[in-house]
Image (cartoon, rainbow, N blue to C red):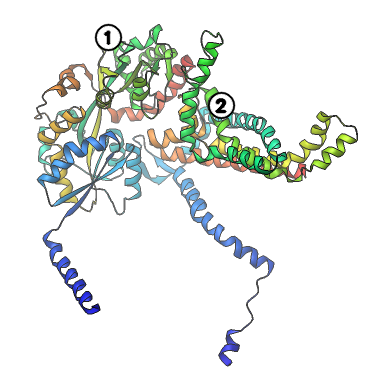
Amino acid sequence: MTSLALSHTEPRRLGPLGTASALLLPIAVVNAIGFLWPVVNLLKMSFREAQASGALGAGYNLDTWTNALTDSFTLELITNSVGVSLLITVLTLIASYPIALYLHRSTGTWRTVLMVLVVAPLLTSAVVRTYGWIAILSDRGLVANALMALGMAEPPRLMFNLTGVVIGLTEILMPYMILALLSGFGRLDPRLEEAALTLGASPLKTFWRVVLPLTAPGMALGGLLCFVLAISSFVTPKLLGGGRVFLLATEIYDQAIVTLNWPLAAALSMIVLVVFGISLTLYARALRRIA
Amino acid sequence: MNAAYKFGTLCLLAAGLMAGPAAAETNLTVMAYSGLFQERYTKAVIEPFMKAHPDIKVTFFPLPSSAAMLGNLRAQKAAPQADVVIMDVSVSKAGTDEGLFTKIDETNIPNVKDLYPNARIPSVAGVGVTFDNLVLLYNAEQVKEAPKSWMEMAKAPYKGKVVIPGVPDIQGLGLVLILNKANGGTDYLANVDKGLAAVAEIAPNVQTWEPKPEVYAPIITGQAALGVGYNARAQVNSEQSGGKIKATIPQEGTIFQINTINLVAGAPAADAAKTFVNYALSPEAQKSFTETMFYAPTNSKAEITGAALDRTAVKNLDKVMSVDWIALAQVRDKIAEQWRRRVLPASR
């Protein structure tokens, strides 16, 4: 009896704060091991002494950082990366918004079919899809042939330049944007649109004054997601850029794999992280303004 | 039943324990390039080696690039997993400077005495195990006759039909050096202005400076007509594609790319590693690999016969310009910067 009574002690209760931290603990541990620790190592690496042969010296110094921050090429890399990623984000948003809106309004089996179609591209890797774009955009590809059939003497250069990178990444990022938009469309109640229309607003005005503001949180989330994915993507710019597009991600690859300057690759990676931080802050501000 | 089973297990265990030392096998890990290299090197060198040394079991540790190998070695510095590494000479220099390798010379590897002088690089711990050379690649259907000059790539019919792995890749860098010399440049360590100017003439015709996965595929498919690549891979690709891609050394000459073989410092199977390296440098192994993958041998005693003779740079040694890859590494960033400013704008 006594033993039973002992085993029946009151379970220790966690306060709301305690529960929250207990629930957050697993992800915190995973993040510490999988993200924070590598980032700390990366930061350390950026201060290692880089010898011309590619060897890592034993000592630590500021050379890599001073060189990187005074080199105009670094600035060019940052502006290129941010500019191209913004362009891709805007294009992805424009291309995805109508699809997401249509999906949001469709119902039943049709909606399921469409959802599968939207998510399906994610089943193949970005590498495979990029090779697909190479086949489509090449000088003898689908697009070039179609343009020539329409009477164009020489098809425009569609890849191995910035155009190719923008086309490829926009398509690759569309599923993410559509899913992010859909998740943010929760507040969009069809009755509100109906109300606006019955009160005499034109469809365009309804869209501009009712639909767009209500979907803004989804757009902000999708924008953040696509921007971050675009600026960190490296396979597609490498394959479709033809060595003519210089971005932070591709330069990090070259420095790490070809030139063996790991400290510089690490420093550039930290710069990307700073850009991430800035875009997160801007996102948080945008959200506050929307709300 | 149960007791008999236990007894049986014990007997097997005992037998296993006793048999253990008798069949003592040394496990040797050789880290080198994946893909074609792995396939051909295993066939030409590793399998015959294991036949000759039944007590050594060689495991091939394939990695896509020398940089990936260096990364692995750095991570394993405290407890190396690989014993022997085959990698590009400039990466090998970085590894040497970091103390990752044991110096190879005649005293620990007897076959070193027969190596060509340019296979022995004083500041690098390893020694040359293969020589490859830069070649002008062409699609046999679109280009009927072997081009005589690298500058063929600048001609009008090849607009948008040229693929070159650009600087900082060694292939693009090599092209700059060759054309620099051909146009009267003397010291490539001081400047490569003439080479860059010549490549800038080719630049408008270039389809991509990043042919992926390698330069050979677009030429085989006819997507490109001309390109710059390595001889060994070009020869194997030519063989496998039924001659759709061909390679030639133009009149301006070529450069060697050197792969070195290195002993990993503090490797678990250090003795077996020395045995293997000595074998890999032997005339027999050198001949076998040259005839299988068309790298030129680094051992002067290797007598190459048959088709391989015409398909390697062995007969064209006078056309090979010597390059100090170690010194060049010091100015590579500078060349890359000039490349971006002077060559790429011409190819937009």
Marks 1 and 2 share the same chain: no
Q: Which chain is mark 1 on?
A: B
Quarter containing the N terminus of chain B:
bottom left
- Closest to the observer, B231 or B255: B231
Picture layout, residue B147 above or below residue B84: above
Can residue B326 be seen here? yes
Sort mark 2 into few (<14), some (14-19) or many (20+) by Cα contacts within 10 Å. some
Q: Which chain is mark 2 on?
A: A
- Occupied quadrant, residue B24: bottom left
Q: Is residue A152 left or right of residue B87?
A: right
Q: Is residue A166 left or right of residue B341?
A: right
Q: Amino acid at mark 2?
A: Ile
- Closest to the observer, A80 or A130: A130
Residue shown at the point (60%, 88%) measured from the top left: A5
Percent across and percent down for residue A192 are: 83, 41
Can residue B126 be seen here? no
* Residue, far bottom: A1
- Occupied quadrant, residue B130: top left
Q: Is residue B228 left or right of residue B264?
A: right
- Secondary structure under tag 1 reads loop
**What label does residue A167 carry, if any?**
2
- Secondary structure under tag 2 reads helix
Sort mark 1 into few (<14), some (14-19) or many (20+) by Cα contacts within 10 Å. few
Residue shown at the point (37%, 37%) measured from the top left: A51
- Occupied quadrant, residue B207: top left
Give the residue pinned by disc 1: B145
Percent across and percent down for residue A279 are: 63, 40
